Each structure stands twice: as C-alpha cells, then as structure tokens.
Image (spheres, helix red, strand yellow):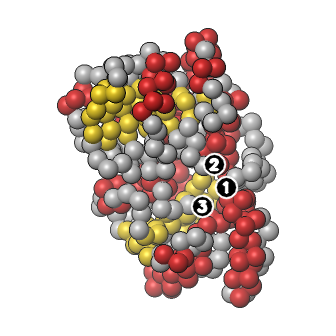
Amino acid sequence: MFISGPALGHLSRIVQVVRQLRALTDAEVSIAMPSPARFNVGQYAENVRLIPLDIDQEDQEFPAISFGNQLEELFSHERPDLIVHDCNPVRWLSTTRFPNCPRVCVTNFFLTRLANLPTDQKLSFSRYGNLIKNERSRKGMPVMKDAYEGYEADQVLLADPPILVDSFEATSHRYHACGACWWEAAGNLPPELEQLDNFLLCSLGSTGKKLNDHFVRKVADKYGCRDIVIAQACTKGENVRKVGSHTIYSYKSVPLSRLVPKAGAIITQGGAGSTYQALAAGKPVVIVPTHTNHALLGRLLSKQRLAYMYTKNWKLGLLSRDAVEKMRSEISRIGPQSVENSGPGAIATRIADLVTA
C-alpha cells in the first residue's frame, strides 16, 4: 500500500514508481490519499487502485488525527505486506499506528535528518507538537522526538540525484539516493505549441503560486524569450493571450518532455520533480518558491550555481548575462545526465526486493 500526500508531486512520483514496479512483481498495489485534492486525481493515476480518504473541513488545519484513524481502519481491512509513504509525515502520519510490516519512505534529502534544514515540517511540528504528543499518548505510541522522525523507516529512498546528496553524509545505511523522479503527462502537444522555440516555460505543478504577467515578461526578456508557456495543474483551463509583445499560453497539463528541450529558460516553484527535469535538460532555472521547502531546494541549488531563486528581497535585475552563462556552464560541468529521471526505476527495484524478501 502506498500513501500519498495531496500534492501532485507526491502522487505523480508514486504513479511513476508503480508503473516500474509492475514489471518487477505481481504484487497487488493500492494508493491511499487524502480527498479532496486540488487537481483531477484520475487524470494522473489511470489504471491504479486509488483509495480516497475524506478529510472534513474542520480537520483541514491539522488532518493527521482524522487521516491516521482512517488509515488504521484501512490497514485492518487491507492487511498490507509493505507500506510506502510519500507525503508530509508530520501533517499526515504523525499519529498513525502502522501495522507490523516493512515500511518505506520516499522523499527528498533536503527534508530529512541528512540536511538538517529548517523545513516546513519542523515549523509544523513546533506548532502542533502538543496535539501530536497527546494523541500518540492516547494510542499508547512513543513520543515523537522531532519532525525528522516522521521520515525514518526501514528504508528511506531519496528521489534526488546522487550528485546532490553525496555532500551530505548519510547517518544510516537505510538512506539511498535513487535519482531524480518526475512525472510526464501523456498526449500530444497542442498545435499552437508545436512550432515554438526558445520560449520561457513556467513549470509550476499543483503547488506553484500564480505568477503575474508583468513578472514572467521580465524573466522572458532577461533570457531573450518572446513567448511564454505556463503549465500549472490548478489553473482554470487553456488560455492564450497577448500581453504587450509577448504571447502567453496557459495549460493545466501538457507533455513537458516535449517542451523542456526547446525552452530557453524555465521557471519552477521549487518542486523537486519540475526543477530536476529542467536541470536534466541543461536549462537555466529560476525558482519562485511557494513555501519553505521550495525555498530550501532553491537555496541549495543557488549555492551550487545550478539555479537562481527569486524572492521579494531579490532583484531580478541582478541576474546578469554573465551570471546566466555561469549557471549554464555549471549545469554543463556536472552533466545533465547526472540529473536524469532514473529515480522511479531505482525506487521500484528496492521496493520489489522488499516485497519478495
């Protein structure tokens, strides 16, 4: 049984792993996740058994207790032989009693004890720590010491390029850098995008903030891009509009692998999948973070000159032509192939080994 968070990045990563897993084992697979999601779940998880667990409005602020109780009831019926979770464990799993079976956490290194960074999960744990403590005590569970504990499992499979993880010394043999992982939409490019080249691509997933036209035009001008393509799962639908001398195309979902190679530059929200996909194509990346964890990845990549992170305190005008060329040079130096989409296969292989052990 997989447990997914409600963001597209979590579910799409799981779906990629499941597709690879089917070639390695005939184990029955299901995915439990909170409902409702902010996007059309069925579109991204066709031919996968999904188990939605409804979260009432009054539980939305901190849903761990409601979600945990529903998971425990689900475990009693389903009796999983292996549990794999890919979500914010403080928000969703901190009060869940897991059955006595192997458990795997799929996540990113910068959220774990390896990096020891001030994650959104740490902030959440400090805010809801007493509530978590009381509920765990009521259930006879041990005290949860910190937010990082939620990421501990029999194996912690990191959906990150090893080249980014290697500088962080693993404290346990349970951590494995499996490679980048991103989801690919099926289908063809809309006809109006077929002939575009050297455009600004805004790959924002389901968690990216809405970018105003003035900002994306400034970024496009900085990189010499005329057209702008916005892919964002929570947009209202397809839209094509002229803004000054620029044409802006907006879509809920497009096959990004057909667009990324032709883009002149890429904006992401700091989601690991979309950002790694851009780097794997050797493209300059500007990260406009939506929340704390996006900013953490942005800072890590900015420090290594692999991306630039935009915040309210950072002036886009400081991004000089020389800085852009240095970023391209650094991406070329590490080799875009080191950031390839190898994570789903490597994660699936380790899971399959546990299933058949």
Q: Is residue 69 above or below residue 32?
A: below
Q: Which residue is mark 3?
A: 88
Q: Which residue is mark 1?
A: 120
Provide the secondary structure element on which disc 2 rests: helix
Residue 199 picture quarter: top left
Q: Extreme top residue here?
A: 322
Amino acid beneath label 2: Asn
- Eye-nearest disc, 2 or 3: 2
Name which residue lies at 41% across and 55% down.
Answer: 15
Q: Are marks 2 and 1 in contact (CB under 8 Å)?
A: yes
CA gap, disc 2 and disc 3:
11 Å
Name which residue lies at 67% across and 43% down.
Answer: 296
Q: Are marks 1 and 3 in contact (CB under 8 Å)?
A: yes
Mark 1 or 3 closer to N-term? 3
Residue 225 horizontal/vertical position (percent): 41, 19
Amino acid beneath label 1: Asp
Residue 243 picture quarter: top left
Residue 247 horizontal/vertical position (percent): 31, 26
Provide the secondary structure element on which disc 1 rests: helix
CA gap, disc 2 and disc 1:
6 Å
Quadrant housing the C terminus:
bottom right
CA gap, disc 1 and disc 3:
9 Å
